[in-house]
Amino acid sequence: HVSAMSDRGTDNHSEVTDFILVGFRVRPELHILLFLIFLLVYAMILLGNVGMMTIIMTDPRLNTPMYFFLGNLSFIDLFYSSVIAPKAMINFWSESKSISFAGCVTQLFLFALFIVAEGFLLAAMAYDRFIAICNPLLYSAQMSTRLCTQLVAGSYICGCISSVLQTSMVFTLSFCGSRAIDHFYCDTRPLERISCSDFFIYRMISFFLSTIIILPTIIVIIISYLYIVSTVLKIRSSEGRKKAFSTCSSHLGVVSVLYGAVFFMYLTPDRFPELSKVASLCYTLVTPMLNPLIYSLRNKDVKESVTNII
């Protein structure tokens, strides 16, 4: 009987040609409001991040390691929100709300790649601020173009490796129950809920992957900031302290929003899928919208560059 069940599971796995993205469980009249909110937020993401990349690439004064990282952060934000927002907006108007099997794989793969790359990039940015504040005389020698390029390339490579592993693990599960994914994009937890595979090995590998991705990035960020804070506190003039800390406050804001949303999402029990949708909204759309705002409002170089363009 068990073998018959597992055979049926594998048969069904090969038969799954598409999934249904349930989206938000709200009254139909609210779909228009949600669509407009998504549209507005996505327009701000496009405007903010394309604007930020344009300013960084065209203004020679912004040709520094910090802005090289910031340009890549804007590219990542723009890309992963574009993997999710357009499809979610189409689904507000769609009757079937379906996404093909290949489309679902692609969405999960690209999203996982860019969200992990962003985590590593934020760690590289923390290291950059640490060198700038704690060893300012060695800054230009230590943060060479070569090292910056390697750190950014490393972020994408780590994202790619973890995404290949994660995506291949998720899609080797058998989906023998419902095809309805209770989410607005293809994510691992909603996909696990509709699978009937044994999760033991999958959970072990998943936990191991999360640990080797999240722990090193958080450790680098925390250690960098411990050094930064101890150095800033030694500065005698309050003006100097303020200046040193203002270069970090933007980065700290971005880190807090992203990691706060990720932890909230993963600590939300499975019993509350709507709550986890709200949490994932934070890092799929709110973070990419806020990042350019946080950096441009807190940053005098970017402000000057914008006023020069205007």
Image (cartoon, rainbow, N blue to C red):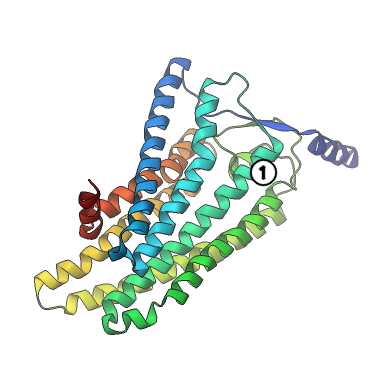
Seen at 22% across and 67% down, the residue is: 245
Q: Which residue is mark 1?
A: 105
Seen at 59% across and 18% down, the residue is: 95
In terms of depth relative to the viewer, which is nearer, 92 or 279?
92
Residue 239 appears at what percent x and percent y?
Answer: 10, 69
Seen at 32% across and 54% down, the residue is: 55
Identity, as a three-letter code, of the amino acid under mark 1? Val
Whether residue 142 is visible, yes or no, is yes
Horizontal side, residue 237 vs residue 62: left or right: left
**Where the C terminus falls, by quadrant?**
top left
Horizontal side, residue 178 vs residue 224: left or right: right
Residue 208's place in the image compared with 107, above or below, is below
Q: How many marks?
A: 1
**Where the N terminus falls, by quadrant?**
top right
Residue 206 appears at what percent x and percent y?
Answer: 63, 56
User: Which element type, helix, strand or loop, lies under badge 1?
Assistant: helix
